[in-house]
Image: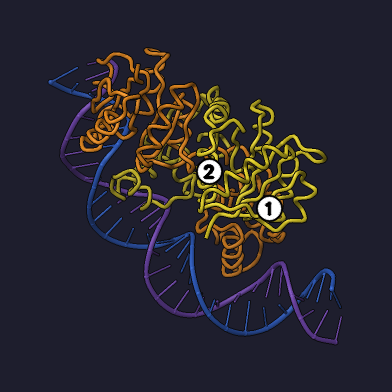
Chain colours: A yellow, B orange, C blue, D purple
Amino acid sequence: MSIRIGIVEDHSEFRQSLCFLIASYSDFSVLWACSSVEDAWKQEPADVLLLDINLPGQSGIDAIPEFRSRFPDQKIIMLTILEDEYHIMQAIRNGADGYILKKTAPPRILDSIQQVYEGGAALTPMVARQVLAFFKPAATVQDTNHLTPREKEILALITEGISTDKIADKLFISTQTVRNHIKNIYEKLQVHSKAQAVAKALKEKLV
Amino acid sequence: MSIRIGIVEDHSEFRQSLCFLIASYSDFSVLWACSSVEDAWKQEPADVLLLDINLPGQSGIDAIPEFRSRFPDQKIIMLTILEDEYHIMQAIRNGADGYILKKTAPPRILDSIQQVYEGGAALTPMVARQVLAFFKPAATVQDTNHLTPREKEILALITEGISTDKIADKLFISTQTVRNHIKNIYEKLQVHSKAQAVAKALKEKLV
DNA sequence: ATAACAATAGCCCAAACAGGTCATTTTATA
DNA sequence: TATAAAATGACCTGTTTGGGCTATTGTTAT
C-alpha cells in the first residue's frame, strides 16, 4: 500500500510537477491535488498533506488547525518558498509536522514525506537551523545549581514521566542508584514524591 | 576538497565503522577519530565534528560550549543513541548544529554532514518531532474539555503533590472514589502515573 | 593527605499506587 | 421519561515508591 498524498498548491505548473514526481515512485500516490484550502475541504483525508502557504483564499498556515481537527491522522507538511522565521514558527505552532522548501531536491521531498508518514518530523536544513536558533539564548538561569548534573538529568527524566526502572535502563546504572539520586533530589527540593518533584521542576523551570 | 570530519566516539567498533563509511566517499574524509573529549582537545579543528554523548570523562553535551569557543567554525553534530527530550534539548541549547541517532542509515548520516557543512541544521525525524513539540503549547485546550469538573479538580490536587488519601479527605469522599477518578484521568490523558499526569497537566496548561 | 562531594550499589519495610472488574446514585438532557 | 454521563464506592492483585540505612569508588579542593 502506497502513501496517499494530498496536495494544496495554486501554482499549476509546480502542482503538475509534484504529481509527476510522486507518481513515478511506487511507494507514493497522489490521492488528490487542488489549488485552494476551500477545495481541499471537499476531499477525503490523505496520509500526508503537502500544503502551500501563499494561496488564493485562506492561507495554508491558517488552515492547519482545521485540517488537524477534521482529520487528526493526516500529517501536514508545509511546502513553500517562504523561509522566514515568522512563517516557519507560525506553521510549527499551528501543528505542522514538517516544513520544507520548494527548492528542495525531489528525492528529499519524498524522503520527508516518508519520514513524516512514519511519525517523524521533517525540516529542511535551513529551516531546522532557524528552529534550533530559538533555543540558544535560553541558558536558563537555574536555581538548580544545588542539584548535581546527574540529579538534573534524572529529574528531567522523572519530569517526562519515566519510571525509576526505565531511567536506570536508559542511563545504564542500577535501579538502586537511581533511587538514591531521587532521594537526594527530594531532599534538596523539599518534596516527597515524584508528582511533587515534577510540579516543582516544571513550575520553577528547573528543567 | 573534501569535508574533513572529526569523530569523538568511545565505542571502537562503531568508530571504525564510521571511518570506513566516510572513507568510502570522496567528498568526505576523516581528519581524526578519538574516544574522549579530552583527547579531542589535542586535535586540530575539523570542518564537522561527530560527537557522542555518553563518553568516558566529560560528556559530549557538556563539551559543546568549549568546542564552540575554541573552534567557532567547527560544526557539531551529536551522533548518539539517546533520543530523550532532556539530552536533545541540552545539546541544542549548548549549540549543536545537528542531532542524529546512531541507528540512522549511513547515507543519511553523510547527508546530514553535508547539510550542516553547508550551514544548515540536521535533525533525525524523531528528534525533529520532539523539537517541534516544544512550540505547540495551545492545541490541547480542547483536550481539557473532556475532563469533567471533578476530574479537573482532582488533577489540580495531584499537581500540588497531594496523596490520594489526602485528596479523599479534602473532598470528603472515599479513597476508592478518588482512585476511580484518577484512573479515568489517566485514560483521558493517556498516562500511567501521577508524575506523568502532573507533567502533562503543567506542560499543556491543563490546570 | 584529608575532607567533601558525586556517583555508584545494595538491603529492608511499609505505604502508596496502578490496573482490573463491578455496582449504586445523582444529574442533566435529549 | 429514557438514557447517557458523572460521581460515588468497593474488592483484589501485584508493582512501585519513599524512607531508613550502609558502603565503595573516584574526583576536587583545601
Amino acid type, residue under disc 2 in the picture? Leu
- Letter of the chain that mark 1 sits on in the rendering: A
- Letter of the chain that mark 2 sits on in the rendering: A
> A132 or A39, which is in the foreground?
A39
> B83 or A31, which is in the foreground?
A31
Q: Residue at x 48, y 50 (%)?
A: A161
Q: Are marks 2 and 1 on the same chain?
A: yes
Q: Position of residue C17 (x, y in %)?
A: 49, 60
Q: Quadrant of residue A15?
A: top right
Q: Residue at x 67, y 37 (%)?
A: A14
Q: Quadrant of residue B98?
A: top left
Q: Is residue A38 above or below residue C5?
A: below
Q: Is residue A11 left or right of residue A174?
A: right
Q: Residue at x 23, y 25 (%)?
A: B34
Residue B126's label in the rendered image is none
Q: Is any atom of residue A152 visible in this view?
A: no
Q: Is residue B56 left or right of residue B155?
A: left
Q: CA distance from mark 2 to mark 1?
A: 16 Å
- Element type where label 2 sits in the image: helix
* Residue that numbered label 2 is attached to: A110
Q: Position of residue A133 (x, y in %)?
A: 55, 25
* Residue that numbered label 1 is attached to: A32
> A148 or B51, which is in the foreground?
B51
Q: Is residue B23 above or below residue A158?
A: above
Amino acid type, residue under disc 1 in the picture? Trp
Q: Quadrant of residue B189?
A: bottom right
Category of crowding for the residue at label 2, using alpha-carbon neighbours closer than 10 angstroms: few (below 14), some (14–19), many (at least 20): some
Q: Is residue A29 above or below residue B93?
A: below
